[in-house]
Image (spheres, rainbow, N blue to C red):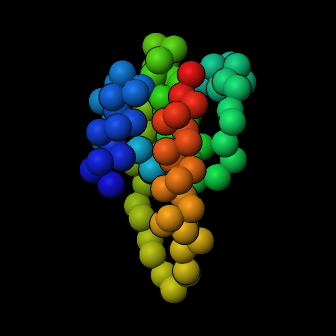
Amino acid sequence: MIFGILIISTFSKKRIKDTQSGYRAIRVNILKDLKLKTNRYETESEILMKLGRKGARFGRVMIPVIYRDEESSIHPVKDAVRFVKVLKHRK
């Protein structure tokens, strides 16, 4: 996870403490103009990189994390490949 934070922070040109919080404060007019190429777990990384490069301000909203008996639908290999593709097409 730290590796991902460093990569996203580097490519977004902003220091980001948690790249996968899933809960962000982003102005709608800025978000509407983004042309996203992703639609899964890598989408937040794509958004952060594009917003950072645009010089947009964004923040995170702290929320408690509650894990119960749910099973994760993250596929480590498939989602890692998707993340690398985001880095490849980060423009």
**Viewer-nearest residue: 42 or 20:** 42
Identified at 42% across, 26% down, the residue is: 12
Question: Residue 87 appears at what percent x and percent y?
Answer: 49, 36
- Please tell me in which quadrant of the rendered image residue 66 appears: bottom left
Question: Residue 85 appears at what percent x and percent y?
Answer: 56, 42
Image quadrant where one finds the C terminus = top right
> Residue 75, can we see it?
yes
Identified at 43% across, 54% down, the residue is: 63
**Viewer-nearest residue: 18 or 41:** 41
Q: With 41 as the anchor, is 66 left or right in this view?
A: left
Question: Residue 84 appears at what percent x and percent y?
Answer: 49, 45
Q: With 55 as the anchor, is 91 left or right in this view?
A: right
Identified at 33% across, 55% down, the residue is: 1
Q: Measured along the vertical axis of the image, is residue 23 above or below residue 36?
A: below
Q: Measured along the vertical axis of the image, is residue 35 above or below residue 62?
A: above
Q: Measured along the vertical axis of the image, is residue 59 above or below residue 72?
A: above
Furthest residue toward bottom: 69
> Residue 44, can we see it?
no
Q: With 21 as the anchor, is 10 left or right in this view?
A: left
Furthest residue toward top: 55
Report how many numbered discs are placed on residues in the image.
0
Identified at 36% across, 21% down, the residue is: 13
